[in-house]
Each structure stands twice: as structure tokens, then as C-alpha cells.
Amino acid sequence: MPARLSLNAISKHYGPESQQVTALNEVSLSLEEGEFLAIQGPSGSGKSTLLNICGLIDHPSSGDYHLNGIAVAQLNEQQRCTHRRQMIGFIFQRHQLIPAMTVYENIAYPLLLNNISAKNTRYEVEQILTTLDLMQRRKHLPRQLSGGERQRVGIARALIKRPQLVIADEPSASLDHQHTHTGLQLMRELNQAFGASFLIASHDPFVIDHCDRRISLLDGRMDDRA
Ligand SMILES: Nc1ncnc2c1ncn2[C@@H]1O[C@H](COP(=O)(O)OP(=O)(O)O)[C@@H](O)[C@H]1O
Ligand SMILES: [Mg+2]
């Protein structure tokens, strides 16, 4: 089942009251089931903050967020964690791989957490390793990889469990054109085969053009001129 998001007047402030930074200022948006949405905007405009809130990694300061009709504010930490694990694949800008795990183990980990058998895990992981050109790197540790390889492992780890919602924070930042193309193709396959919804922050025109719709952020607000 694909995911549906609805954000209503979401704001996020960081820091103590005397020196508060407003990262998001009453942002409202909806993501339909199976939609591929790009979020563009200059550095510091609030893209990562928005994605972290949508991905249940961070809490908004105010506003309502519904995920598949569920009021996220009502969930306790345990429920948030379960939703994150089962529904959401998050591609981090800085990949956030587990340093002590090999490439294979990093990618297999989400399947392990979701109780997939070792045999199926092996099949799935080897398939995505091949697609993303990582087979030769499967026994390496993250620190032994190039930036682009780490980014591809991050993409594989997010997509491997076929989540209903994929959130990607500048997924092509350290990728060359060919691997960006492959990554987007994999995302589209997941979108078409399972109807997964996508929320992608990027300022790469190639990525943005690939999306169905785009919204722009400027200083934490939706920029309607774009
Ligand atoms: N943890 C934090 N503490 C304080 N300020 C933050 C924090 N994270 C982000 N900010 C500030 O919030 C604003 C939006 O940041 P961010 O969401 O990272 O934007 P983007 O991803 O578009 O570059 C920036 O002014 C940034 O400095
Ligand atoms: Mg960012």
C-alpha cells in the first residue's frame, strides 16, 4: 500500500527562545499515494528539516502531520519507530551507514529487522548489489568506499525493503550521471511495481525533471513563484 502524507502549517524552530532559528514556517503540503515529489530550494531553506519531520526522525514545533491518515503527534516513540522501520526508506545526505558493518550487512540489516529469511535476504541483497554496481564491494566497510559508493549503499539500504514511502535527501549529491540515472530508475521501478511514494530534496535538475511535481522552499516557506 503506498503512503499518503498531509502536512498542515508545519513550523520548526531550533535553539533557545532568545536565539531561535525558524527552519520551517507554516509549510503545508500533501503527497498523494504513488506520487514522486521533488523539493527544491537553496542551502538552508529547510529541505532537510522538512524531510526529517516527514520521515519521523524529528518533531515539528507546531502544525499537523498525518501519515496515511494517522495523526503522527499521537504516536509514542515505540510506534514512531515501528512505522519508520516498516514503512519508510530514508536516503540520508551523509548516508549514515553503520561503520562496523560491511556493505552487504548494511544493506541486509533492514530485512533482518523485518524478519525476512536469510535465503530471501541473500537473494534480494545480491540483486540490488548487482544493479547498483556494488558486487565487488560487498565485503568492504563504509570507510573503504568512495563517496559515490557509500551513497549507492545508502540508496540500496533504503530501497531493499520496498517501503511505501521513500524519502531522499539530495540522493545524487556524490553520484556521477550514470549512477544517478540507475538510482532514479530503481526508484521508478519501485514506484511503478508497488506504488511507493517519493519525497526527494534536490537541486540537481536531472533529478528534479524526473519527478512528477516539484515544490520550492525559500527561508523555510513554500515559494509559490516556482
Ligand atoms: N539542529 C539544528 N540546530 C539549529 N539550527 C538548525 C539545525 N538544523 C538546521 N538548522 C537551521 O535550519 C535552517 C534550515 O536548515 P536545513 O533544513 O538543513 O536546510 P537545507 O536542507 O535546505 O539546507 C538553516 O538555517 C539551518 O542552519
Ligand atoms: Mg539539507
Image (cartoon, rainbow, N blue to C red):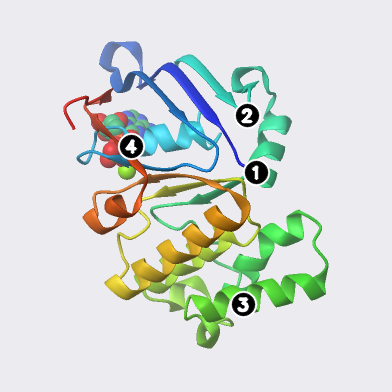
- Element class at badge 3: helix
Q: Which residue is mark 2?
A: 68
User: Rounded to the nearest whole Å, what is the CA distance between mark 4 and mark 2?
Assistant: 21 Å
In the depicted structure, whether residue 30 falls above or below residue 51: above
**Residue 77, image x, y percentages:** 68, 29
Q: Which mark is residue 50?
A: none
Q: Which residue is mark 1?
A: 87
- Element class at badge 1: helix
**For the residues bearing labels 1 and 3, Cβ distance under 8 angstroms:** no
- Residue type at mark 1 is Met
For the N terminus, the image quarter is: top right
- Residue type at mark 3 is Gln
Mark 4 or mark 2, earlier in chain: 4
For the C terminus, the image quarter is: top left
Q: Which mark is residue 47?
A: 4
**Residue 174, image x, y percentages:** 31, 65
Mark 3 or mark 2, earlier in chain: 2
Q: Which residue is mark 3?
A: 127
Within 8 Å of ligand 1, the CB of disc 4? yes
Split into quadrants, the picture shows ligand 1 in the one at: top left
